[in-house]
Image: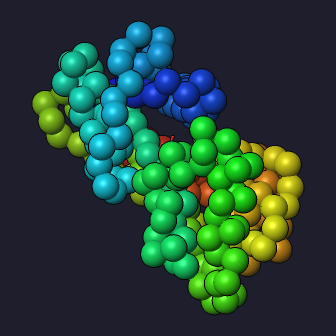
Amino acid sequence: MKLTKIIFASHNAGKIKEIKELLEPYGIQVMSALDMDLPDVEETGTTFAENSLLKSQTIAAQTKMPCLADDSGLCVDALNGAPGVYSARYAPNRDFAKGMDKLLSEMEKSPDKSRKAYFSCVISLAWPDGKYEIFEGRVDGMIAREKKGNFGFGYDPLFIPDGFEQSFAEMNKDEKNKISHRGRAVKKLQEFLKNL
Ligand code: IMP
């Protein structure tokens, strides 16, 4: 089935703009939950895939249209995978400068080998009949001992991807997208759309 219209289950203006730019070249018109005044679906799952699917399947069932959603976060070895699906809520009042200070203080005594971490992103595409596709992206790296850089968002200043010396916040958008969890998941989605 050729996909021409899709709903993106997000109220985040930054993510909406990014998804529109990525899918329009494929002839797909993207309408967001924000544009359509649809409710925000609560993330009650315990995995990225569960939360992503919860959002895409709920909105696909409500609107009877194909729907895209994503969920992402940072998993740190020394914290047994936390903050994980709670990455946004881990930062007090969604203040990520405070969230990063909290992370650094919880990891204060961690040896270098347990500072390993990864970002994960799960994009799901749900059809109104309940069928779905999942596209996952992951990037491995380390949590730095101090914040570095001013680009990006969230925990970027603390994340040094494997094979690099700079943090995500010291890379420009294109450099980060090439290796990031979100960039990798989106690439898989684009491959799928190309072959539809
Ligand atoms: P959500 O996917 O909108 O639920 O947000 C997950 C949270 O994970 C964000 O609020 C950020 O704190 C964090 N996060 C996800 N991806 C990134 C990234 O690329 N850089 C920095 N933080 C991220």
Rendered position, 190 above or below 82: above
| Relative image position of residue 58 (x, y in whole percent) | 24, 29
Where residue 41 sits in the image (x, y, percent)?
A: 33, 29
Image quarter where the N terminus lies is top left
Above-or-below relation of 121 to 6 = below
Specify whether residue 28 is in view: no
Residue at the image point whose x is 77% and y is 58% from the top: 157
Q: Is residue 96 left or right of residue 166?
A: left
Q: How many marks?
A: 0
Answer with the quarter of the image where residue 74 lies: bottom right
Front one among 177 and 46: 46
Q: Residue at x 50, y 60 (%)?
A: 83
Q: Is residue 79 left or right of residue 155?
A: left
- Give the residue drawn at x 82%, y 74%: 165
Rendering colour mode: rainbow
Residue 21 is situated, as x and y percent measured from the top left of the image, at 61, 29
